[in-house]
Image (cartoon, grey):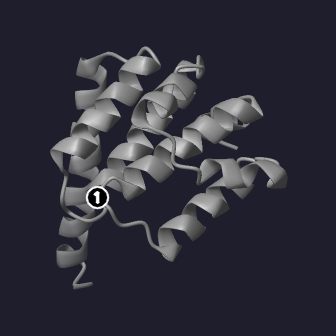
Amino acid sequence: MDRQFDAILSMSDDAKVAYLQAFTRLASIDGKFDDSEKAYIKSLAEQYTVPTERISEIFKLESDDEIIKSVSKIKNRRAALELIKELCFLAHADDELSDKETLFIGRIGQAMGVELEKIEQISNWVIDRIISAEEAKVIFEEV
């Protein structure tokens, strides 16, 4: 297994639930939260070995402040950086990064002790990866 996956697996169940609640909140921040998004998050919960009886907690949309309070318990730096990375990928999935999404990711990162400069660095890296993937489709005539 790779380091980022190990970092997530080593977290407590409470931290894993908080981690995935952040996904749920970001996915629904635009007012839409469809079945495919729910299925994706549920599959992550299974991968991260969240106990079955706790999966429903992931989908209970707490206030942003409650979710931020919950993620502040994530003390593993690698897991915190992974969460920021994954939230950035999720925010860019629809090709529209809203101010609400940006603010939420920033608040989540800061709650876990991740500096704004690091969050911006991760976001820029994610954007570069997305652009590179799109360029590859053109180069290899997959469009």
Which residue is located at x 43 percent, y 14 percent? 113
Asked which quadrant contains residue 40, the reply is bottom right
Q: Secondary structure at mark 1?
A: loop
Which residue is located at x 23 percent, y 29 percent? 120
The outermost residue toward the front is 63
- Quadrant in which the N terminus is drawn: top right
- Quadrant in which the C terminus is drawn: bottom left
Which residue is located at x 59 percent, y 54 percent? 59
Residue 107 placement (x, y as % from top left): 34, 26
Residue 61 placement (x, y as % from top left): 51, 48
Observer-nearest of 118 and 53 = 53
Q: Which residue is mark 1?
A: 30
Observer-nearest of 107 and 5 = 107
Q: Is residue 96 visible?
A: yes
Residue 62 placement (x, y as % from top left): 51, 41
Residue 51 placement (x, y as % from top left): 82, 48
Is 103 above or below relative to 142? above
**Residue 11 horizontal side relative to residue 81, left or right:** right
**Residue 12 horizontal side relative to residue 70, left or right:** right
**Residue 53 horizontal side relative to residue 67, left or right:** right
Q: Is residue 47 visible?
A: no
Q: Amino acid at mark 1?
A: Asp
Which residue is located at x 21 percent, y 48 percent? 128
